[in-house]
Amino acid sequence: MLKLNCKNSDYSIIGETHGLNLQEEFNNYSTEIADIIRSLNQRKDRQGEWLQWMNLGYNEETVWYVKEFASLVEGRFDNILVLGIGGSVLGGLAVTEAILKPYWNFLSKEQRNNLPRLFFLDNIDPDSINAILDILDLKKTLVNVITKSGDTAETMSQFMVIKNLMENALGDDYRKNIVATTDKKMGILRQLADQEGYKIFYVPDDIGGRFSVFSSVGLLPFALVGLDIDKIIQGIKDIDLELKNTDINQNIAAQFALIHYLMDTKKGKNISVLMPYSSRLKLIPDWYVQLIAESLGKKSNRNGETVNTGITPLKAIGASDQHTILQLLNEGPNNKVVTFIRVQEFNTQLSIPKIFEYTGIGYLGGKTVNDLLRAEMYSTRVSLADNNRPSLTLTMDKIDEYNVAQLLYMLEVQTAIAGELYNINAYNQPGVEQVKNYMYALMGRAGYEGSATSIQEKMNRGSKSESVNA
Ligand code: PA5
């Protein structure tokens, strides 16, 4: 089970100015936290609360359908190509990067146990889209287009390009190479999938993109490349039970959320650095960035007051970023909380040969790279504490479906608790909508003509005229 060590955020280690009296704060907030946990669990089935993600550990029907489809197409495709953006792919990217064998797409078919290679297109960079299209044989590629709204411009433009190419390559059969993951009732992709006869998986109601990784959004790509989705679900179920505990002393999501909240509101530390000491976990901070930024960065609270809340998430990776960001963490503004992710037991071990014994690197010989990575993490943690910088450490037993699922789910639950502490709606993203409206206007979408004039004027303020076609 995932563990949290918070002692390096306590005043006894990093001093009163920067540290919290953790036990006192846990006592002070015990009733509020218990009420929050009770309330989230009571509201989770209520329509419009956007808390259905809390039920994903119990969604046996989706697991069954996903497994059935994965076994139906087993052996038919050399490649899976996932199209999507933001919450529709960040979880998929993070989990598959963690669990699949490293360098998966470079392994031979035998080394991949005949499972397909996996590609994500999560942006609209023309060079990378063209490059992937050069690599993939579309006849042997299953395309999974994921968009809850069904009309996200980035995803649907990718899809339009690829659908045309597939039709040219496969004729009418192209339909068998497309799976749509989208809303049950609404959206253009939903209509298209019906008209054209694509296989469809649904994103359940009341789950936002950034909380959707354990719905069909993530489970389908996971199953298609052979991840054990039963273990994922078991991991969530087991930790969900722990995180229902209303006693903050027993609930690591509540501790994680409260410490960040108090570090922000009492100590002015509103930057959260997530730093796994494992390359396989390197995309988890990307997923965390969206989860925290979109959920907690809000102009207004639930009472309609302007609060401009937010914790700024920062991604890092150990040990590499000891050589990039650590200088700033140790000596720059003391406004950050660093969370280390420590893997108790790596899947493999790598010994460093005893060579160059009588040189300055001789001490490394006979040790393992595993020892070195562990020593790097402890050294960073202690040096941050020396400089009165708070940190937390999450320890996972190993990297597999069960443990990775627990890590992500805990971070979701802590985000929900933090949202309640800040008294904001953690499930909307009004700050993203304005940009979408401007983009529609610039690209000539019907109904946005008024915005087109206004944005054109604003684009030209103080500069020579610019145009989207330039
Ligand atoms: O978390 C979110 O809600 C967003 O990041 C969405 O996932 C992202 O905007 C993509 O939306 P959609 O799935 O509708 O294409």
Image (cartoon, grey):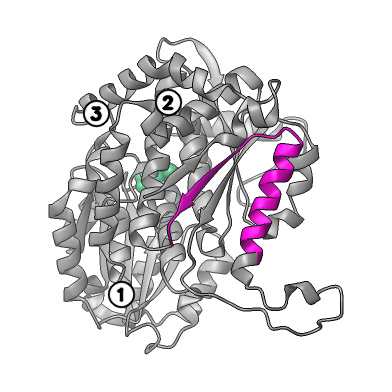
Spatial distance from mark 3 to mark 2, Cα to Cα? Answer: 14 Å
Could you say which disc has been placed on residue 419 in the image?
2
> Looking at the picture, does residue 68 appear above or below residue 420?
below
- CA gap between label 1 and label 3 equals 47 Å
Labels 2 & 1 near each other (Cβ < 8 A)? no
Name the side, left or right, on which 296 lies relative to 48.
right
Where does label 1 land, which residue?
167
Relative to 43, say whether 306 is above or below: above
Q: Residues within 10 Å of mark 3 (few under 14, many from 20)?
A: some
Give amino acid for label 3: Asn
Q: Does the stretch in magenta take in 427?
A: no
Inspect the image, locate mark 1, and give the three-letter code of the amino acid beneath it. Glu
> Quick one: 271 or 253, which is closer to the camera?
253
Q: Where's residue 49, x and y in %?
A: 27, 27
For residue 41, which numbered disc appears in the image? 3
Secondary structure state at the residue bearing disc 3: helix
Q: Which residues are magenta?
A: 372-398
